[in-house]
Image (spheres, helix red, strand yellow):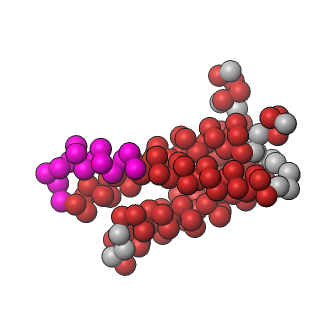
Amino acid sequence: MIKKIFDPTMIRFLMVGVINTIVGTGTMFLLYNFVGCSYWFSSSANYIVGGCVSYFLNKFFTFKNREKSWLQVLKFIMTVVFCYFIGFGVAKPVTMWLLDTQPIVIQENIAMCIGMCLYVVLNYFIQKFMVFNTNMK
């Protein structure tokens, strides 16, 4: 089971993640810190922009999946939404509680970083075993 989890797809997933992080996180922090958008708008923009990049890179490069299916697209979208709300929904209140004496901008920037980490872990496993897994048929 461990070998099935830690296989070459994880390395490719992390490589795609670097590209995604540059694109999505750049969008998120730019919107939050320079445009003045809210925590939720900025972090969701990250996953809308990054999600588009992620779908194609993970489908064809990471998991080498050639299936043509609207159900797969729907599963991917549902995975992104689920991971987003779990990751960021948990990160913000916990960070706000832990750093309650810090300025809100510090709390929310740290919460966004923690939310990204939670998102990545959940997202990898759901994509690997549920969205792009061709062995599940």
Residue farthest toward the left in the current orientation of the protein: 101
Indicate whether residue 4 is drawn in magenta: no
Residue 65 location, x and y as percent?
82, 48
> On the image, which quarter does residue 7 sit in?
top right
Residue at the spot x=75%, y=45% of the render? 132
- The reply, left or right, for residue 89 in relation to residue 8 is left
Residue at the spot x=85%, y=36% of the render? 137
Residue 22 location, x and y as percent?
53, 62
Indicate whether residue 100 is drawn in magenta: yes
Depth order, front residue of 70/59: 70
Residue 5, placed above or below residue 131:
above
Residue farthest toward the top in the current orientation of the protein: 1
Residue 14, placed above or below residue 24:
above
Residue 129 location, x and y as percent?
70, 36
Q: Which residues are magenta?
A: 89-103
Residue 5, placed above or below residue 32:
above
- The reply, left or right, for residue 102 in relation to residue 76 is left
Residue at the spot x=33%, y=51% of the render? 92
